[in-house]
Image: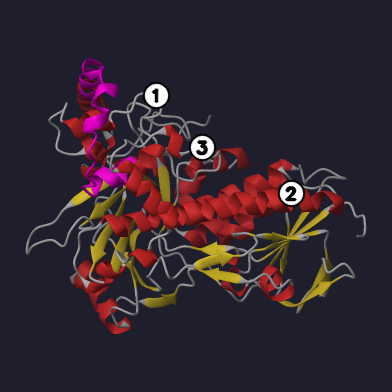
Amino acid sequence: MTQQTVQQVVVVGGGTAGWLTAANLAKRFNSTQPGSIQVTIVESPDIPTIGVGEGTWPTMRKTLANLGISETEFLVKCNASLKQATKFVNWRETPAAGDSNHYYHLFTSVYDASDFNLAPYWQRGDLGSSTYAQSVSVQGEVCERKLAPKAITHKEYEGAQNYAYHLDAGLFADLLKQHAVEVLGVKHIAANVSQVNLDKDEYIASVTTDRSGVIEGDFFIDCTGFKCLLLGDALGVKFKKVDNALLTDHAVVMQVPYQDEQQEIASCTISTAQEAGWIWDIGLSNRRGTGYVYSSKFTSHEQAEQTLRDYVGPESEGLMTRVIPMNIGYREKFWHKNCLAVGLSAAFIEPLEASAIFLMEAASNMLCDLFPRDRQAMAVVEKKFNQSFQFRWNKTIDFIKMHYVLSQRTEPFWLANQHQETIPETLTELLERWRYHPVSDYDFDNVYEPFPMESYQYVLYGMGFKQDLSFNAGRYSKSAQAIQNFNNVQHIAQQVESKLPSNRDLLNKVNQYGFQKL
């Protein structure tokens, strides 16, 4: 194998995946300085990024702060809003006419479940609150009232509650592009890649473009989406479908204007179960982004569009829709030789729980942390990276599938999700263990766990998962402390709710005044 120092990184493809990865690398390695690692991004000028309303995880706050992007600028330029949870409507069971059910997967609990897990005490009935989320967090009520997680007096990226964002992905890519090029030293080339060229060791040596000729590099990052031009086409890494477990395969999407500029903005992603899938509803500052994720085996594309229009109501009249096929699965390897895939090139799991952008963040962070300085070092990093992300994607599949498995809906699509052959063995084992044991730290022994213990508990108890903890009763002798903690949650709720503005009011003030910088 040829010994070669890694000095030139070429990212092929833009969008959130390409620009976020390029910006992270350039920031980490000081690309504005002579002699440092240089980052070039080759972006097709013919493929626009269209925002349908995207959700992030709270990790995005740290990512943006590390890149040196102002939170005020981000919120204003990306039509972004503040997200504190996902509200799952009608997932637990098919609602009767005029009725509905819901639960919250929240970002903030008052007490860390790893330190003192209140779930077993809630299960035993040591508190009268009707839902688990209400018993351990104030954030559900904050979301019900469409309140923001912070006030205008908070500094950028700080808040009274943990939070993430809803954003327009197209505008977000534009902001990242501007910052990466103008501030961080990323070189931007607008061109289409027509050929990928390998050297004698079958590493990628260069890409040939239609407008800028041949672009050489030492390390290549594939952000070309489902096409996967580098890792898939050129290097032959195959795609592993997981449509046997996750049954949805299409989405029909629609952008819905607000009725007026002061219409309230939801503080959470709203996910509403439907006959053959579910609808997301994401409130940006200027509009809502909605989409119906469904299985074409259980409904037609025409019926799916009508289901979305029925959900939106009369406002949908005249609004355009797009149908997006979803290729559910991941590459057998994410890193091969001198090429790493990030974003849709690496994997796509249906958008429930908004894991896509988080896993882009995680991939670019791990690349920066373990970046190989020569070819000889690549094999070790490749192995570690592939192990890590195969674990992360499989855990994400398990977590998403759990929502379907726990549902008591009776339509054919939902019943198909109950078939044992569609349920990963790892998920079956967890659910069997949790029937008689509380969720514990022993279930999360890997540093790369994408979803923490508390996330599982919000979903399990929100969906009505039943546990028999009777033979474990002796373990829960701290009832007095549990009751005190439950009471404290209610006291904190009263304090927090009285001090927070609405999401809309806060965003109006951000546009007018901005946050105080850190």
Q: CA distance from mark 2 to mark 1?
A: 34 Å
Q: Is residue 79 visible?
A: no
In the rendered image, residue 182 lying in the magenta stretch gets the answer no
Q: Which residue is mark 2?
A: 381
Alpha-carbon neighbours of circle 1 within 10 Å: few (<14), some, or many (≥20)?
Answer: few
User: Taken as a whole, is the magenta stretch helix, strand or loop?
Assistant: helix
Establish if 449 lies above or below 189: above
Left or right: residue 6 compared with residue 60: right
Residue 217 badge:
none
In the rendered image, residue 357, in percent from the top left (x then y), is placed at: 51, 54
First in sequence: mark 2 vs mark 1:
1
Disc 2 residue type (three-letter): Val
Q: Which residue is mark 3?
A: 445
Q: Disc 1 vs disc 3: Cβ atoms closer than 8 Å?
A: no
In the figure, residue 482 lies in which quadrant? top left
Left or right: residue 442 compared with residue 63: left
Q: Which residue is mark 1?
A: 115
Q: Residue at x 32, y 55 (%)?
A: 403
Q: CA distance from mark 1 to mark 3?
A: 15 Å
The quarter of the picture where the N terminus appears is bottom right
In the rendered image, residue 132, in percent from the top left (x then y), is placed at: 23, 37
For mark 3, give the secondary structure. Answer: loop
Q: Is residue 130 visible?
A: yes
Q: Residue at x 72, y 44 (%)?
A: 370
For mark 2, give the secondary structure. Answer: helix
Left or right: residue 245 compared with residue 66: left
In the rendered image, residue 161, in percent from the top left (x then y), is placed at: 36, 33
Alpha-carbon neighbours of circle 3 within 10 Å: few (<14), some, or many (≥20)?
Answer: few
In magenta, the rendered stretch is 457-486
Q: CA distance from mark 2 to mark 3?
A: 22 Å
Disc 1 residue type (three-letter): Asp
First in sequence: mark 1 vs mark 3:
1
